[in-house]
Image (tube, rainbow, N blue to C red):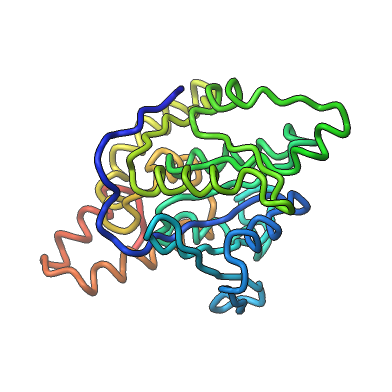
């Protein structure tokens, strides 16, 4: 196993938030329905026409709030759906992100998996449609895939409920921090890595305040890309943090300026 389950009880919190992400047509909505049953509702994302479903389920005495994010192929925010998915994973305060994949075309789905693992280490891969894969003669080495990715991979057939208890157990362990993941780190050209090495340390202080669960490395990569939507989203949260900050505004501004985040 590429992780270690830490002994001891889960935190005393009575509610965890779980983001459910995935490409279209992976059975993500089926997983959502199987987890939440009738305890769900839908609504537009604030300021968007994008519909997002939300539901709850209870497992081992803990209530889990599940956000069914729009189906996307990437988080580069080229569409409103991608922007909503990215912003929730970055800033939604989730305790874990479950990425639903299709076992019959896994390679196509791994791009999103890798992008999400760059943002947050608290990832669970739900390998859905295992029955379809078997019918097509496709075999997936789940243990090796998990070892290569550095995060837990749980095979499921959501429409029959197969694998859902194991999925809920794994979500609980990742969300509570009892299961420590080590996500695969994607490396880029030496030129890009040199820029990241320069920017990342300066981002750490700001990200620790406005989005403590998000990787400064991933934010550095997006800043290098010149992602205007992400820059704007971080700037808004920095300014919001300043408005609530008891420190002198000049000190908070100084931290952000050193990180390259505009006011």
| Up-down relation of residue 236 to residue 199 (above or below) | below
Relative depth, front residue between 187 and 158 = 158
* Residue reaching furthest to the right: 136
Residue 188, position in %: x, y? 54, 26
Where is residue 94 shown, x and y percent of the image? 42, 57
Q: Which one is nearer the viewer's eye here, 245 or 153? A: 153
Nearest the camera: 172 or 221? 172
| 225 vs 118, nearest the viewer | 118
Measured as percent of width and height from the top left, residue 75 is found at 60, 50
Q: Residue at x 58, y 23 (%)?
A: 143
Q: Is residue 174 above or below residue 24?
A: above
Which residue is located at x 23 percent, y 68 percent? 242
Q: Is residue 24 left or right of residue 156?
A: right
Residue shown at the point (50%, 67%) measured from the top left: 56
Question: Toward which corner of the image does residue 211 lie, by quadrant?
Answer: bottom left
For residue 188, side relative to residue 181 (left or right): right
- In this picture, residue 139 sits left or right of residue 167: right
Which of the image's four quarters has the C terminus? bottom left
Instruction: Using residue 84 as the reference point, say whether residue 180 is left or right of it.
Output: left
* Quadrant position of residue 42: bottom right
Residue 72 % position (x, y): 68, 54
Q: Residue at x 31, y 51 (%)?
A: 212
């Amino acid at each position: 196993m590429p992780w270690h389950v830490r002994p001891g009880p889960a935190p005393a919190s009575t509610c965890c938030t779980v983001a459910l992400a995935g490409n279209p047509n992976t059975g993500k909505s089926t997983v959502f329905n199987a987890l939440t049953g009738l305890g769900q509702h839908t609504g537009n994302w604030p300021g968007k026409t994008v519909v997002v479903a939300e539901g709850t389920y209870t497992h081992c005495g803990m209530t889990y709030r599940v956000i069914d994010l729009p189906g996307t192929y990437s988080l580069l925010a080229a569409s409103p759906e991608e922007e909503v998915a990215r912003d929730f994973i970055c800033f939604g305060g989730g305790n874990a992100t479950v990425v639903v994949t299709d076992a019959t075309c896994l390679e196509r789905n791994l791009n999103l998996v890798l992008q999400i693992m760059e943002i947050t280490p608290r990832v669970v891969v739900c390998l859905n449609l295992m029955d379809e894969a078997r019918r097509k003669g496709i075999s997936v080495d789940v243990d090796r895939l998990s070892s290569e990715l550095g995060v837990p991979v749980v095979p499921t057939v959501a429409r029959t409920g197969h694998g859902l208890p194991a999925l809920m157990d794994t979500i609980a362990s990742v969300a509570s921090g009892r299961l420590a993941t080590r996500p695969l780190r994607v490396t880029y050209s030496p030129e890009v890595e040199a820029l990241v090495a320069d920017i990342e340390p300066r981002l750490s202080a700001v990200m620790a305040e406005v989005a403590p669960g998000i990787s400064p490395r991933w934010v550095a990569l997006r800043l290098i890309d010149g992602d205007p939507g992400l820059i704007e989203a971080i700037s808004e949260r920095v300014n919001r943090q300043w408005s609530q900050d008891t420190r002198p505004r000049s000190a908070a501004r100084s931290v952000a300026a050193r990180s390259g985040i505009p006011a």
